[in-house]
Amino acid sequence: MELYGKEKGLAFVIHVSPAPEPADFDVKVRRKGLKHLAGKRIPLHSPLPSGVGIPPYWRDCLDDLHKSYNGICAYLCIYIERVTGAASTDHFIPKSADPGLAYEWNNYRLASMTINAKKGICQTVLDPFKVRNDWFRLELLTGRIYPNPVLRIELKTLVANTIELLGLDKPGIRNIRNCHFQDYINNNISQTYLQKYSPFVYAEAENQGLL
């Protein structure tokens, strides 16, 4: 993961680098999924017929997904506790739109269940794998996220839509970031804890020389 912005006082949303496919993914997920699609004669790259579901074999790799991405939600940049059931597999290209990608590791993003539910079948959200570190801005003291003002209007609109659709700037999410920072400066948590649980805030604190 790339963590750092360049301007003092502002940090950028973390770009997520794709993690390698686990060695047993093909056996645990892909083969079983493709076998089911073939048996039901479901076309791989056409929308699922109305009312047709597919088995969630991707759940068998959720532990791997959580480990591969250090437990960090690809959209919130906040740690998700695996044992609470708060982590989920986001199909970046919705499985209803392209069932052939339902069982592909490179189509998965680790996401909190709340964010995954908000995203749903939306296909206008920016891909964390393709986001650049200067597209989103973060105000450390408030937790506010907003589009970089210097972006061209089309890209700025995409960033703003992603923030709005996923609720990334809701008061509750702002408060989480602010609480993480306040806990750190009040010596309630360590640098290591901040880096693990709130890497976006950690990056900005380091950017300002506060670590």
Image (cartoon, rainbow, N blue to C red):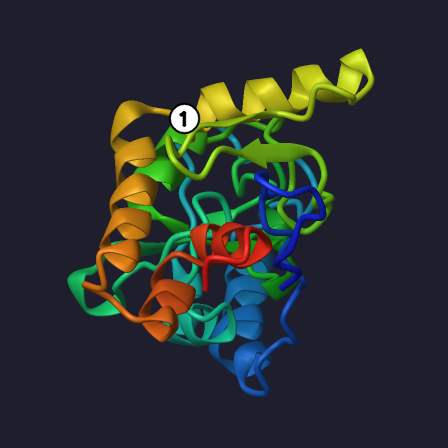
Residue 24 image offset from top left, x and y in percent: 54, 86
Image quadrant where residue 169 sits: top left
The amino acid type, in three-letter code, at marker 1 is Asp
Locate residue 209, reporting x and y percent. Answer: 54, 58
Q: Give me the residue at 49% from left, 44% from top.
A: 75
Residue positioned 25% across, 63% down in the render: 81
Q: Is residue 128 above or below residue 143?
A: below
- Frontmost residue, 31 versus 36: 31
Count all numbered tags in the image, as a single digit.
Answer: 1
The image quadrant that residue 7 belongs to is top right
Residue 47 appears in the figure: no
Q: Give coordinates of residue 43: x percent, y percent.
A: 66, 45
Q: Which residue is mark 1?
A: 169
Q: Characterize the local packing of mark 1: few (<14), some (14-19) or many (20 or more) Cα atoms within 10 angstroms.
A: some
Image quadrant for the C terminus?
Answer: bottom left
Relative to 186, residue 170 above or below? above
Relative horizontal placement of residue 195, taking residue 37 as reference (left or right):
left
Q: Is residue 39 left or right of residue 18?
A: left
Q: Could you tell whether 103 is left or right of 175 in the image?
A: right
Q: Residue at x 52, y 31 (%)?
A: 49
Q: Residue at x 21, y 59 (%)?
A: 85
Q: Residue furthest right?
A: 152
| Residue 116 visible in the snapshot | yes
In the image, is 149 to the left or to the right of 51?
right
User: Where residue 167 appears, x then y in whole percent?
Assistant: 39, 26
Which is more toward the observer, 189 or 26? 189
> Element under label 1?
loop
Q: Is 143 situated above or below 165?
A: below
Q: Nearer the viewer, residue 94 or 169?
A: 169
> Which quadrant of the rendered structure holds the N terminus?
bottom right
